[in-house]
Amino acid sequence: MGIFAAESYISLLVAFAILATAIFAFVNSLLYSPQAYEAAGKLTKTTWCTILGLGVVLQFVPLGLFIINIALLVAALVYLADVRPALGSLRRR
């Protein structure tokens, strides 16, 4: 196995990890009510679902828009690190 084959496998693994993260964040954003987003003081549900849905769709489109994919991955990570815990804390009360 050459170095280029290993690099291809690693790139494929990273792409699947990014896709899985984007899908998980998108599906999770659909589970909360619009009122929960407002109560948590975050962007609206429509806004988050649009951003995260775009992130999932653009992962499947091979346009070479690497910087946009990275920006949408960062949005998914922000959702998972900031918004999701805020929404979850509202549910536990």
Image: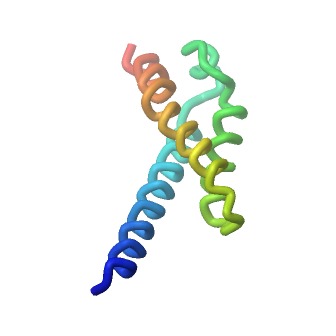
Horizontal and vertical percent position of residue 43: 66, 23
Q: Nearer the viewer, residue 51 or 64?
A: 64
Q: Residue at x 47, y 29 (%)?
A: 84
Q: Nearer the viewer, residue 11 or 86?
A: 11
Q: How is the image coloured?
A: rainbow
Horizontal and vertical percent position of residue 83: 51, 26
Q: Is residue 83 above or below residue 6?
A: above
Q: Residue at x 62, y 55 (%)?
A: 66
Question: Going by the image, does 27 lie left or right of 55?
Answer: left
Q: How many marks?
A: 0
Q: Nearer the viewer, residue 57 or 32?
A: 57
Q: Residue at x 60, y 60 (%)?
A: 59
Q: Nearer the viewer, residue 92 or 7?
A: 7
Q: Is residue 3 above or below residue 79?
A: below
Horizontal and vertical percent position of residue 53: 65, 48
Which of the 4 quarters of the picture holds residue 73? top right
Horizontal and vertical percent position of residue 36: 57, 21
Q: Residue at x 37, y 68 (%)?
A: 10
Which of the 4 quarters of the picture holds residue 1? bottom left
Q: Residue furthest bottom?
A: 1
Q: Residue furthest left?
A: 1
Q: Work out which quarter of the rendered image holds the C terminus and state it.
A: top left
